[in-house]
Structure formats: C-alpha cells, structure tokens
Amino acid sequence: MKKPTIRSLAATLGLSPSAVSAALLKRSNISQETQERVRRAAEEAGYSVDARLSQLMSYMSSGKGSRNAPNIAWLFWDHEMNEMNEEKPWVQGYMKGARERANFLGYSLDPIQVHSPKTPNHRLNSIFRARGIEGLIFVRHHWPSPLESCIRWQNFALASVEGTTGGPGMPRLGSIGVLGMEVVFNNLIRLGYRRPGMVISKWVNYANSYQWTAGFLQHQRQFPLGDQLPLLEEDVGKESLRSWMKANRPDVLICSTNETIDILASLGYSVPRDLGVVHINICSDVKGWAGLDQLHEQIGAASVDMVTAQLNRGERGLTDHPKHVYIRGQWVDGWTCPPRA
C-alpha cells in the first residue's frame, strides 16, 4: 500500500493540502474541530510526519542549516521514576502520550535514567551526543539540581513535566490546580455537597506551586462562611485527621493521598455513607474513585510538542521568559462521591 501523504489526506477530507498541513501543525487559523478531524483521519490512515522534511521546511523558511532528525530524551530519576513504575501510574500516562506523539511526528523518544551508576551525570553530554539527542524532557525536575552544572543547556531544546517551576529558564508543563479545583467544586455542587474540606500533602502542594490550595480557598468562597472549612496541609496522619474531622465535620473530603479512605475507616467513618471522598489525581491506583483526571497522556504529548517546536525554530537552552503550559483536567464520577439526597 502507498504511504499516505498530505495530498491524499486532503483529497479524502475535502480540504486543501495547506489546510491539512496547518491542522497537523495545530496552527491557530484552523479550528479545533478541523484539527481533530484531520488528526483522526491521519491516525486511521497511518500517516506520520517526516521529521527530516519538517526540519527542511524550517531551513527553507529561516535560512538556517539543518542536520539529521534529532532524538528526544525522556529523563527520569533512578530512585523514584521510570516509565514502568507501577507505584506512580501517572508517569506511565505521561510516557505513553509522549511516545505516541513523538512517533507520530517522526521522532524517537529515548528514556534515559539519570543520577545512576549506569549513566553518571558527568557522562550525560557525551551520551546525548552519541545518541543524536537534541531535545530533553525532564520528569519532576526540581532546582537546585545535581544536573545543573552537568548539562550543556545551550545545546538542547527543553521541557519539564511537573516539578515546581521546572528550573530557572526551563519551560514547564502540567495540570493547573486552580482550574482543576473549579472543575471539582462545580461537580460537588452538582452532586449536592455543601461542606467540602481538603487534606493535601505538603509535598504535592509545593510541587504544584500551591495551585491546589489556592483553587480550594478561592472556590469555597461561594459557600456560606460557616461552611468554609480550613485546609489540612500535611501528609495524612490518623491523629491529625481525627481532630480535624471532629472539629470541621465535612460532607466531602478532597484529598491527594490514596490511603485517605483506609485512615477514615480506622477512625470510624464509612465512605460514602458518612462523607464523600474526591481524589485530585485519578489513575489506575484509585480506579473507581471520583475526582479529577489530570489528562496525563495529553500532558506528555504536549511536552513533545513543546520540544519539537523549539527544534524547528532553532531555539536551544534556558530562557529568561520560559513558557508554562497547563492543561485543565476533567471530572470522573465514582463510587466514593455519589449524589446526595
């Protein structure tokens, strides 16, 4: 079978080749509906972008030279992250979305474990060079970092998934807690809850630039003052949660920890009979719970888009004004938060 082309897709869809090309590149002059229609047709036909051709077009438009299509490295820490880590299933979502997007765009995604005996930090630049890597995607990268003085940042297009700010001058992608909490509150009101409380890990709060708690404090203002409950910001402990629950009596608890329901049960509370529970990071480890799906695959795909856009524009290194791209999550109904009478 002949490999599908822009022209064959255009003929199938009844669009011009230039419109199909712009849709695949997500140009702002093409509607979201048309972009999605073109993307689905391209996937069904088995079409993928030729990265070398994309770089050639960049060369023709900018006058700058171009080499062979680069690889992109997916960097993870040996002590807490890898793409198969079952304890952190959202990382699998990031990796899946990034790999599919990289393959579609004609790039390869190369997972590299950093800060480990296999890849000592002082050898990273030579490893990148040997593998033809020009783009780096970091997972949960925080500064200051052991990598800060090891990587020649000026040689690479960069993106950080999660993390605090991603580092000085590094673009960042992730979920946006303020708008995510708006989604949560809208659905709690829809389901009949009127006294929401929140318990969140200090680390989760810090790693997301305090957006979750900012969103909670903002959106609880739509309730009467007596139903605006104080935050409990700490890793959930039995005694601290016991006293907080007794003092505040929430009808639903927003949480970031998988053990929350078990701890509530040990204190004599039954979910959902006594109160609802909502998780802000719905994954396979809390399957069936109600809460927010942060759309991890979309975040992973967007990280590849960010890096490849820099590569095609000839941009490298840290910048004084890094872009931060946030994706709004979506609500998932579940047994832990049923409608109230």
Image: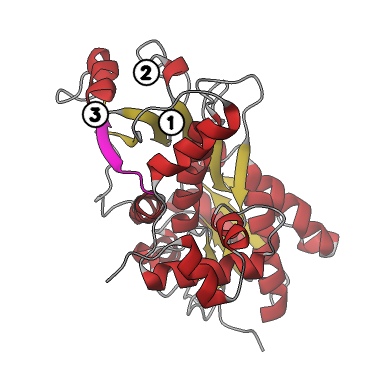
- Residue, far bottom: 341
The residue indicated by pointer 1 is 141
Q: Residue 147 has which mark?
A: 2
Span shown in magenta: 106-113
Q: Residue at x 20, y 25 (%)?
A: 116
Q: Under tag 3, what secondary structure?
A: loop
Reply above or below: 34 against 314.
Answer: below
Residue 299 location in percent, x, y? 49, 51
Reply above or below: 275 against 302.
Answer: below
Taking the magenta stretch, the answer to whether it contains residue 109 is yes
Closer to the eye: label 1 or 3: 3
The amino acid pointed to by label 1 is His
Q: Under tag 1, what secondary structure?
A: loop
Q: Dot 2: few (<14), some (14–19), or many (≥20) neighbours within 10 Å?
A: some
For the residue pair 153 and 65, the one nearer the viewer reads as 65
Q: Residue 27 has which mark?
A: none
The amino acid pointed to by label 3 is Arg
**Circles 2 and 1: CB distance less than 8 Å?**
yes
Residue 162 shows up from this direction: no
**Residue 340 found in image quarter:** bottom right
**Residue 67 found in image quarter:** top left
The residue indicated by pointer 3 is 131
Closer to the eye: label 2 or 3: 3
